[in-house]
Image (cartoon, grey):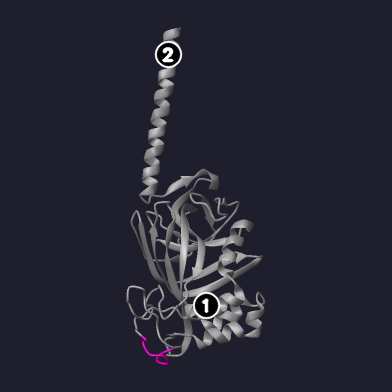
Amino acid sequence: MRRVLGLSVLALVAACVEQAADSAESADRGSAGDSGIDGAFGGQPVSLAIAFRRYQVISVEDGISAGFNLDGLITADEGSGCGGSDATASDGTPGIDNGVGQLWADFYEVLGEPLQSLFEESVSRGGKIPVLAFPADRPSRFSTARLNGAQVDFDGLLAGYQTFDVEQPGWQIDLVRTDNELVFGPASVEVQVEGFNVSIPIPIEQFQGALRRGPDGIWRGIVAGSFGVAAIPEVFGETTSLSRGEALVDALRRASDLPASIGTCDRISFAATVEAVEGFVVAPGEP
């Protein structure tokens, strides 16, 4: 009897070791970019993703700004081109497009940090946040994920390694990813942030970014793009007195720095620092 019991215990231990090894192997496969199955979503396929949790507009100070050259041009002289001169990167690279950053000091005095407030509100109230999904067997997508009961870390920011529900497939986007670097875009997408019982969809052109994974597992970097100034009143509607008073729209029009195809200066560029965490989304299907 004692021998039978001893053999049973050994068999149980061996089974546990084998199960742990299988779990580790699955985790390794997941980190390499494969999709898995999440029973919490009825056995639907789940894709690896990163979810954005912090966003801050980059100001242009003394003509210096981080960002990208969105239009491929270098507008060096005040008054030439659209809305004045381009900025220069800290490493001396010219042609950085960040029209919103030219105005951000004034915006901040009036608005505070509204975009980050919306992000935090989305987390606390179960709104939506932007995500990049990269399934192994399909093109990468930029979409929005619903935060149903999302967990936060000790800073009150969105915690990583959660599974989010993507309601629509989103927009296909070129994406190159290694273990510690991520580059995506440019693409035309729609950024939708939901908070304070308000959903704000903003069509973005030339959306692109470059992020690096830190030792703490958090992805940090820069995103940039442009949006049409004419769409601002429609986008914000009755959500802010600034749109009704035209102060915000007038300022954006004056700082418009990118032309449309017909040559009219009707778009404004932006650049922002972002922070994102790794997680999972229910794999969005093809549109």
Density class for disc 2 (Cα within 10 Å; few <14, some 14-19, many ≥20) is few
The residue at 57%/84% (across/down) is 249
Q: Which residues are magenta?
A: 75-82
Density class for disc 1 (Cα within 10 Å; few <14, some 14-19, many ≥20) is many
Mark 2, residue position? 6
Q: Secondary structure at mark 2?
A: helix
**Count of numbered circles in the view:** 2
The residue at 37%/39% (across/down) is 25
On screen, residue 36 versus residue 191, left or right, reads left
Q: Position of residue 215 (x, y in %)?
A: 39, 52
On screen, residue 256 versus residue 248, left or right, reads left
Give amino acid for label 1.
Trp
Q: Secondary structure at mark 1?
A: helix
The residue at 43%/72% (across/down) is 224
Residue 216 versus residue 265 in the image, above or below: above
The residue lying furthest to the bottom in this view is: 79
Give amino acid for label 2.
Gly
In this view of the protein, which residue sits in the foreground, 152 or 149?
Answer: 152
The residue lying furthest to the top in this view is: 1
Quarter of the view holding residue 122: bottom right
The prevailing secondary structure element of the residues shown in magenta is loop
Magenta span contains residue 118: no
Residue 219 versus residue 186 in the image, above or below: above
Q: Position of residue 211 (x, y in %)?
A: 39, 62
Mark 1, residue position? 104
On screen, residue 49 versus residue 105, left or right, reads left
The residue at 63%/81% (across/down) is 243
Mark carried by residue 260: none
Q: Position of residue 185 (x, y in %)?
A: 39, 69
The residue lying furthest to the front in this view is: 62
